[in-house]
Amino acid sequence: MALIVHKYGGTSMGSTERIRNVAKRVAKWARAGHQMVVVPSAMSGETNRLLGLAKELAPAKSNEATNRELDMLAATGEQASSALLAIALQAEGMASVSYAGWQVPIKTNSAYTKARIESIDDQRVRADLAQGKVVIVTGFQGIDEQGHITTLGRGGSDTSAVAVAAAMKADECLIYTDVDGVYTTDPRVVPEARRLHTVSFEEMLEMASMGSKVLQIRSVEFAGKYKVPLRVLSSFTPWDIDINEEAKSGTLITFEEDEKMEQAIVSGIAFNRDEAKISVVGVPDKPGIAYQILGAVADANIEVDMIIQNISKDGKTDFSFTVNRNDYARAMDLLKDKVVPALGAQEVLGDTKICKVSIVGIGMRSHVGIASKMFRSLSEEGINIQMISTSEIKTSVVIDEKYMELAVRALHKAFDLDQPAA
Ligand code: ASP
Ligand code: MG
């Protein structure tokens, strides 16, 4: 008998029909002898609907008081879906009880709309499990020190599930979703993309942070920190498929480099179009310029991703970096109005039509020539590389966004990702 956490996304909870299927699937697992904790998202579209209502009433307001109410509001979505699932389970003849985050309690800090989980008290849940009940815990929400309801940010139910699994020391956390696992790249861009049977936690982290939106990034960080065995799998298989087959399906996120696991050097190609490039041109090359430019950007709460400083010529240098596109206009204004005049730089240039493409794989640690292979295949496609950054298990390039799909396809092929692993 194992303690298992299931998480169901909004699509899986999207109608009473689907909720009934979830209940049947969960009942199957419980009847196989497992202790079951289930963490559902709100029914699909519900969080958007609720937040949309708020927006009608207060279009641009973002302040502490309003954010508190947004959490109060959005948390109801998961409360409803959790109760519905408990009702469906009871209708299946399974004893079941649902709890909102505050009832468990799941304690968080007070950062409304993006709170972080601080602790989970597992006593109440354990007592119900001991009585043979299936326990449903709302995703996405918790309670802060003062008793205010908080939410964990969009997609936060993944993090709830992993945190509950960590607190309960669950044997496995299964994330049921509308895709059947983690792929070598987005199958909409490369039809030959393959599902990975396993992916290491570090690789998953790199992919999740680069636009592969299967899991909320924080849930992956959490899983890594507490070594929660995590699996991503489809909720669209028939609920009555063989449980052993189901237990092996999808993608397992692993923590060790197991010999028998897929040994590709590059495991996946990630990409995103969320960034914009900014160059400060003709900056006097003296100590402190990086700080003066990026310090001002950081003070405005704008996150910077890639950074490049050129060698200087005639005492001047160029300094380029990328920011999220949402912050682009603000960053440009700040640089033009304050930083450039203060530094005596020549000008600021910006480009929003870029994208970032990355190859990711833990095998890159122990192999040389991987980056050069990447650059070669891009050059064979005539794609110009504007920026490069590397880490132990990733190499990223910034290129013109119009070549994004071409680049992803070329790299997917160059690294043999369309071939089944040996
Ligand atoms: N319902 C929340 C959202 O849509 C949380 C989640 O689904 O994970 O963001
Ligand atoms: Mg999600």
Image: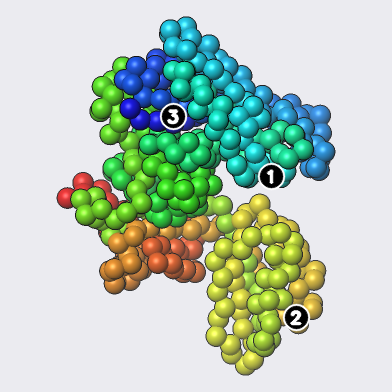
Q: Give the numbered dot on residue 124.
A: none
Res. 189 in view: no
* Circle 2 residue: 343
Pointers 1 and 2 in contact (C-beta within 8 Å): no
The numbered mark, 1 or 2, whose residue comes first in the sequence reads 1
Q: Height in image: 218 above or below 280?
A: above
In the visual, does 30 lie left or right of 58?
Answer: left
Relative image position of residue 73 (x, y in whole percent): 72, 27
Q: Residues within 10 Å of mark 2 (few under 14, many from 20)?
A: some
Residue placed at 48% from the left, 51% from the top?
A: 225
Along the polypeptide, which appears first: circle 2 or circle 3?
A: 3
Query: Which residue is found at the position 70% from the left and 66% from the top?
Result: 297
Cα separation, mark 1 vs mark 2, equals 39 Å
- In the rendered image, the residue lying farthest to the bottom is 314
Q: Is residue 140 above or below residue 404?
A: above
Q: Residue 372 appears at what percent x and percent y? A: 33, 71
Q: Position of residue 333 (x, y in %)?
A: 76, 63
Secondary structure, mark 3, is strand
Total marks placed: 3
Provide the residue designation for mark 1.
Answer: 109
Indicate the amino acid at tag 2.
Answer: Leu
Q: Which mark is residue 6?
A: 3
Would you say 225 lies left or right of 373 here? right
- Ligand 1 is within 8 Å of the C-beta of the residue at disc 1: no
